[in-house]
Amino acid sequence: MRLKSIKLAGFKSFVDPVTVPFESNMTSIVGPNGCGKSNVIDAVRWVMGESSAKMLRGESMADVIFNGSTGRKPVGQATIELLFDNQDGSLGGQYAEYREIAVKRLVTRDGQSLYYFNGQKCRRRDIADLFMGTGLGPRSYAIIGQGMISRLIEARPDELRATIEEAAGISRYKERRRETENR
Ligand code: ATP
Ligand code: MG
C-alpha cells in the first residue's frame, strides 16, 4: 500500500484546491519557514481521524479551516482526500478487492464533520478500522514526529507493547474484543 496523493482544499494555508502527488517512494517537501510543510502532515493526521486540535497545532478544530489572509476571505469548510494505491492488496480483508482507496474528511465551520471511503459516506470509526493494525493512523508510528523516538525509548513496557501490537497487526482484534466485552 502506498500513498499516491493528497488533495487539499480550505485546509490551513491551502485555501485553493491543490493535489500533492507522491510519485516515487521518496518525496521531500522543502520551502521557507511558514510555507505550509508541516500543514501537509497535519492534513494526513486529520483525515485519518485525529480529533485533538492540539495534535494539529491548533486550539479548536475549526482552526484547520483556512481563516483568511491579506486579500483572502476565510472559507467555510476544509476537505482533505488521501489516495492510496492498494495494488499489492496489503490492505487486506474486506478491503483487498480495492486497487485504489480514497479516504476523505470534510469539516465545516458549524462543526459538521464527515468521512468518506471511496466516495461513500462512512463513520469515523470505519476509517479508524481501515487503518488499524497497518501502522498507519492519526497517532501511529507511520508518522514520526519530533520527540517520538525518545518517547519510544523511554516508554513504559505497557506503552511499548501497544506499539508492538500495532506493528504485529493484532491491535485491530484487541479493539474488537474490547468493544464486544463492553457491550
Ligand atoms: P517551518 O519550516 O517553520 O516548520 P512550515 O513550512 O512547516 O514551517 P507550517 O507550520 O506548515 O509551516 O505552516 C504555517 C503557516 O500556516 C502559517 O503561515 C500559518 O499562518 C498558516 N496557517 C495555519 N493555519 C491556518 C489557517 N487556519 N488559515 C490560514 N493559514 C493558516
Ligand atoms: Mg514545520
Image: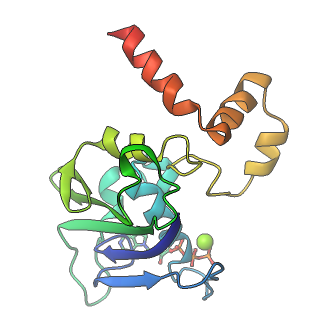
Q: Position of residue 135 (x, y in %)?
A: 59, 48
Res. 110 visible in picture: yes
7, 62: nearer the viewer: 7
Residue at x 50%, y 70% (from the top left corner): 3
Res. 51 visible in picture: no
Compared to 79, does 148 lie above or below? above
* The quadrant where residue 126 appears: top left
Q: Position of residue 138 (x, y in %)?
A: 50, 49
The answer to whether 87 appears left or right of 75 in the picture is right
Residue at x 72%, y 28% (from the top left corner): 161
Q: How many marks?
A: 0
Q: Position of residue 119 (x, y in %)?
A: 20, 62
16, 104: nearer the viewer: 104
60, 37: nearer the viewer: 37
Residue at x 32%, y 10% (from the top left corner): 183
Compared to 100, does 127 lie above or below? above
The answer to whether 22 appears left or right of 168 in the picture is left
* The quadrant where residue 180 appears: top left
Coloring scheme of the render? rainbow
Q: Position of residue 102 (x, y in %)?
A: 33, 64
124, 14: nearer the viewer: 124
Find ligand 2 in the image and state its quadrant: bottom right
The answer to whether 78 appears left or right of 4 in the picture is left
Compared to 115, does 159 lie above or below? above
Residue at x 28%, y 73% (from the top left corner): 10
